């Protein structure tokens, strides 16, 4: 297990890949204000226990990847709700203030709506493959979007997207 509170002292840390790790932000030793230098976060077979955090402590994040074997949990009313049980449906509230995101990779989620992406004006690449998304209309507000991975999703209206968006079906 990693003690993330020590990462705050790494002022030049740009990329953080957590593989087979568990971070619990509710644990006193791992409470941090933020790690502003981190721009890329990748979770590989890892658990991120957000507890009562309002958002991830990476204000300058531009790349977020959560692999299908990773889990995160939030605490609501003294009870943990896990993405294993609820899919990534809980994630949008924790990342909606990350307006610098250019790449968001969240395959195999249970997301049903893309309404949360409207805050991500800089988003260039989005992977929502293997999700429950049916409507991509919110993506029309993302003028920098170049790549959209929607393979194995029930999306039907990709024809409304800009011609500049390469769609993987």
Image: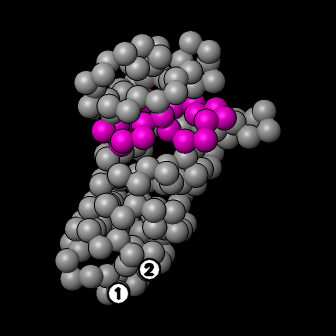
Indicate which disc residue 137 carries.
2
In the rendered image, residue 64, in percent from the top left (x then y), is placed at 36, 45
Q: How many marks?
A: 2
In the rendered image, residue 126, in percent from the top left (x then y), is placed at 33, 60
In the rendered image, residue 156, in percent from the top left (x then y), is placed at 41, 82
In the rendered image, residue 155, in percent from the top left (x then y), is placed at 42, 76
Residue at 52%, 68% in the rendered image: 115
Q: Earlier in the sequence, mark 2 or mark 1?
A: 2
Residue at 22%, 68% in the rendered image: 146
Mark 2–mark 1 CB contact (< 8 Å): yes
Residue at 30%, 38% in the rendered image: 40
Q: From this view, report whether residue 79 is shown above or below residue 161.
A: above
- Give the magenta range: 39-61
Indicate which disc residue 17 carries.
none
Residue 92 horizontal side relative to residue 100, left or right? right
Residue at 46%, 30% in the rendered image: 34
* Magenta stretch holds residue 167: no
Callout 1: helix, strand or loop?
A: helix
* Residue 27 at least partly seen: yes
Say which of 119 and 64 sits in front. Answer: 119
**Separation of marks 2 and 1 at Cα, in angstroms:** 7 Å
Indicate which disc residue 160 carries.
1
Q: Dot 2: few (<14), some (14–19), or many (≥20) neighbours within 10 Å?
A: some
* Magenta stretch holds residue 52: yes
Tell me the quarter of the picture where residue 67 sits: top left
Q: Quadrant of the C terminus?
A: bottom left
Q: From this view, report whether residue 163 is shown above or below residue 42.
A: below
Say which of 154 and 5 sits in front. Answer: 5
Image color mode: one colour
Say which of 16 and 33 sits in front. Answer: 33
Q: Dot 1: few (<14), some (14–19), or many (≥20) neighbours within 10 Å?
A: few
Residue 13 horizontal side relative to residue 76, left or right? left
């Amino acid at each position: 297990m990693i003690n993330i509170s020590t990462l705050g002292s790494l002022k030049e840390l740009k990329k953080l890949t957590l593989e087979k790790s568990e971070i619990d932000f509710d644990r006193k030793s791992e409470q941090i204000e933020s790690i502003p230098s981190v721009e890329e976060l990748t979770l590989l077979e890892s658990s991120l226990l957000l507890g009562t955090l309002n958002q991830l402590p990476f204000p300058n994040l531009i790349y977020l990847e959560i692999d299908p074997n990773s889990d995160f949990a939030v605490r609501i009313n003294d009870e943990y709700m896990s993405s294993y049980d609820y899919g990534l449906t809980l994630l949008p509230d924790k990342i909606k203030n990350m307006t610098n995101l250019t790449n968001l990779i969240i395959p195999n989620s249970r997301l049903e709506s893309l309404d949360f992406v409207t805050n991500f004006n800089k988003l260039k690449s989005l992977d929502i493959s293997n999700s429950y998304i049916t409507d991509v209309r919110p993506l029309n507000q993302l003028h920098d979007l170049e790549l959209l991975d929607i393979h194995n999703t029930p999306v039907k209206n990709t024809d409304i997207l800009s011609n500049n968006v390469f769609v993987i079906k």
